[in-house]
Image (cartoon, grey):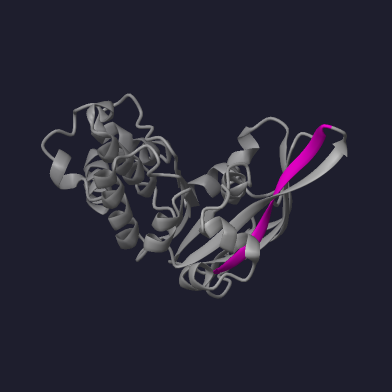
Amino acid sequence: MTQNGAYAIQLKNVDVFYGPKLAVSDVSLNIQTRRITAFIGPSGCGKSTVLRSINRMNDLIPGARVQGDVTFQGQNLYAPEVDPVEVRRRIGMVFQKPNPFPKSIYDNVAYGPRLLGVRSKAVLDEIVEKSLKGAYLWDEVRSDLKKSGLALSGGQQQRLCIARTIAVEPEVILMDEPCSALDPIATQAVEDLMKILVKQYTIVIVTHNMQQAQRVSDFTAFFSIRKQEETPGKENRWGVLGEFAETTELFSSPNSEETERYIRGEFG
């Protein structure tokens, strides 16, 4: 795949459908390499849908389809020759609720490399240690790697999931509300980790927490909802990209009244 300037991912005129229903319309934005980009907006505005279109997770939903261009380092991710499994290796994902496998801590992290054909225990040991160190979890679990990942605290489980993601050496990490199920201390640990990871990875995070977006992100995309009444009492709703800018600029001097109203907490 060829490099394309400072952008890791570019979306151009992206529409996402679930069956015949339009979920998100005409999204165009450029995501910079090794920066944190936050997606914010009210529930139902399509921010998670757009996030999942970046690594083709929407392919796993029956009837879902994406129109427009989603490019990763200049390569159209929806081109016929592109393997969606390879897309998901290079563009990893951390979900809203920590979802460790019902396996040991070691086997959680080694799972992806084993799928990719790594068999050497020495190599797996090295990957597991490096990944857990990268997720700032190693010192807490190094003497207990056979312990079930499900026995960890919520914040530790989320960092384990991050370790599992980086074990296959992605270039981009997508995070879908990664702190919404965590307490404030665990949230701070994950936010601190993001600031360290961004030195090596491009990160895109969906968050309902505007303070979190301000704390961690370099750029923020605000998504909103459009409505159209089809027949009396029945309306169509779909998401649109309302505004995209550097985070400090978007929060201090938004371009649109709608963005300003959302930031002030008038709807959501």
Percent x, y of residue 264: 51, 58
Q: Is residue 202 visible?
A: yes
Percent x, y of residue 136: 22, 50
Percent x, y of residue 119: 32, 37
Q: Is residue 18 left or right of residue 73?
A: right
- Range of residues picked out in magenta: 233-245
Q: Residue furthest right?
A: 231
Q: Is residue 117 magenta?
A: no
- Secondary structure mostly taken by the magenta-highlighted segment of the chain: strand
Percent x, y of residue 150: 28, 27
At 84% from the left edge and 41% from the top edge, which residue is drawn? 229
Q: Quadrant of residue 11?
A: bottom right
Quadrant the N terminus occupies: bottom right
At 35% from the left edge and 45% from the top edge, which residue is drawn? 162
* Image height of 254 relative to 202, above or below: below
Tell me how many marks there are.
0
